[in-house]
Image (cartoon, rainbow, N blue to C red):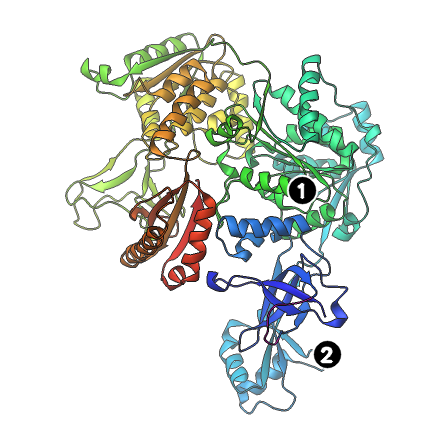
Amino acid sequence: MKIAEVFLNQKNKRIDHAYDYAVPKKSEELIKVGMRVVVAFGFGNRRTEGFVTVVKETSHYTGKIKEILECIDKEPILLKEQVELCLWMKSYYCSLFYEVLSYFTSSVKAIREIEYHQNQEKHAESLAGTWFIQHYFKDDQNRILMDKNVDKKDQQILEELLADRILYPVTIWKTVSDKKIQLYAITPEGAEALEKQKGLGSNQRKLLEFLSRKSMSGAELKVFPGILNSTLKTLINKAYVSVKEITSQSLGGGNAKTDQTALPEVVLTEKEKYWYREIQDLTKAKKNILFHVFDGASKYRLFFKSIEDQLRNGKGTIVLFPEINLTLQRMEMFYKYFGDQVGVYHGQLTQAERHTLFQKVRSGNIRIIIGVRSALFLPMENLGLVIIDDEHDPSYVFMKAPRCHTTDIAQKYCELMGAALILGDDMPRVSTWHQTKEGRINLLEIGVAPQVQKTIEVIDMQKEIHSGNMGFFSRRLIELLISCLHEKQLSVLYINKKGYANCFFCRACGQVEKCPHCGIALKYFHGEQTLACHYCGFQKKIPVKCPTCGSDRMRHMGFGIDQVEVLIRKRFPEARVLNVQGKIKPAEIKKINGELAKGKIDILIGTQIIAKHFDLSRASLAAAVFIDSDINQGDYRSAENVYQNYGRFFSKAMGEHTTGLIQTNDPENDAIYSIVHENYQEFYNSEINYRRLLQYPPVMNMIVFGVFQENAGEAESDALKLYLALKANLKTKKDLKNSLFKPVSIGVISGGNRKYQIILKMADLKEYQKLMTEIIGSGTIEKLKSKVSIEINP
């Protein structure tokens, strides 16, 4: 008899371990590691979903072993190495097994449904019960009723029939059904029009070029929303593009069929060939590599050449981008070199489309995945290389439990798969650079570091105040703005603070306008004359009178980008001013870039979105208006965030003849100094010394416990209980180097929950894992009324 070790889909950490279940004789060939099954659990034999992590011949359990009831999956949905990674993540982050597993199964979700069956030995006696049976079980063919098909108004009758055992429930699990998807292909007429360039707009030509390389599903085209919504319909009407419905199974079988020899070869320059030889040696040795990038074009050619190598050796590649960087131009390059071996995974895919892509990767039909962070968890057999571009981007942090960074997971995954890892960045994270110093990541400089050419002036705002200027703008900034307007040149003002002001309050009684759902102060937006919550999106018009005391002395407090716009328009009424902030649609980005190119904007004011989306090459002035709010944001990574965000802004906005300007009350700040002198190594040395002195990551491990719920008093009480349990446990481990800090309120978080935070610093994470095993085993966390989140080295 074979025995399967099964983790259960449940939420109690005390019982979150593998249980032994007997594999039925008839299922011995079917049940494998990496499959979901249904088991009976507990004294009531509750039908529960589980996941098989080990299949073995014997069990050390001396009691009666229950059998697995049924299989949810027909084949393993995780590779052997992915199961190992899943177990490692559970241990490393002290998470529930199914919390970790959800990252791997988001594309192949198992849907839990309830069926109701008739008890043939009992009959309904009430009129309502009889009607229910006749209505929902109309004939002999309809012997099963799905719970989702019962109207809400009939739920009470259903409960009575269940209580009388006239109906009985059966829980079942289903995976996403195979739905039809649309496949778009170029027609002979379209190929002829493309060849002759006959009657085609630029977007139409671009899309036909894509489809000439490979037919594409609607899911793949979603990454280009502008093209999908307008150009595609036009091409279909012209009969240049055909569309047909097929099932995902039609796409899922077989191996990738592109003949690599028929595609253009990646051509490198002599200098790139030198770097490439180093890359080849390191990737063959399965090493981690950091590209410190000074030449973006070379970076991509080296990416493509490395992928080319992997395909030649029968290996697959996963390439990760921040979602904002999954652009048409970038995808075009991948399709150009690798054809239909490429699959794209992004946030706009439906569940059925994710399922289809999952099957194509699992079957080997796709050998190169380009996507956002979750693409890392697709089951790529023979994975040879993982690439993470723009590795500093905050979107690489997973926000749900377990909260972790994509790079940390990728490093472990590559170790298990025997694959190489390449990270690409122009301004790497401090923790990543620290690993190059420790020899855990190999550093390669791609391109040549620029000599200091930019002129960035630092304006001491304290001196401005002492000389009588009490405004937001320094005299030098006003002077440069006047000059640019006179010369009809573009000025770009960067302020990383949305809205007009931080809050809106009553000067009579002090009442602050707060979100009724989240309990946080509403941000004031001047243009719309509204107050808005940045957690849930709630909006309301600004009140004329205080809802508490009735006073009309309502005022805003704080500083934001809308206030800068108002002041600029007041000072320069003739200027053409544009304010950009928050989420912005692709069509709007294209329109604004067109206006910038034609010189239709005099002063562009924006948050960090302007450095990500817009062409600022015409700028004659690039100014950081209020950098101090970011420097003093109360986070140990403040200096790192300032260096990266503002450094990228000046890098993007400043050309040979552009003047840069930073307004600050702290002109001697190390981050500002490093931005002005464009010296990453200098910044790193300063920052690592600060973190070493105060024992912050990456020098010391920092574990952040979050205790949260709606009731502030209970959240505070639970945080104290957890703190005392941790403190008592650590007292027994006197040799450990650690620091434990008392609970601190950090206010209201998304959803209106009150959150308390406990920080633990430890040198050895293995000792932390031992500590948490004891804390979880004692039931401390399970006894709390509040939820608990754990984050390692945030």
Q: Is residue 299 left or right of residue 17?
A: right
Q: How far across and how far down the image is residue 8, in percent?
A: 56, 64
The number of numbered badges drawn on the structure is 2
Label whose residue precedes the other's in the sequence (1 or 2): 2
Looking at the rendering, the stretch of residues picked out in magenta corresponds to 58-64
- Residue labelled with disc 1: 417
Q: Splitting the image into 4 quarters, where does residue 223 fall?
A: top right
Q: Residue furthest front?
A: 735
Q: Quadrant of the N terminus?
A: bottom right
Of the pair 87 and 141, the residue shown nearer to us: 87
Q: Identify which residue is drawn at 78% across, 34% down.
A: 313
* Closer-to-camera residue (340/399): 399
Give the side of residue 464 with respect to residue 267, left or right. left
Spatial CA span between label 1 and label 2: 50 Å
Instruction: Name the residue that disc number 2 marks.
Output: 141
Q: Position of residue 477 (x, y in %)?
A: 33, 14
Residue density around tag 1, few if under 14, some if 14–19, many if 20 or more, within 10 Å: many
Residue 303 lies within the magenta run: no
**SS under mark 1:** helix
- Identify the residue at horizontal 18%, vertical 15% (top origin): 466
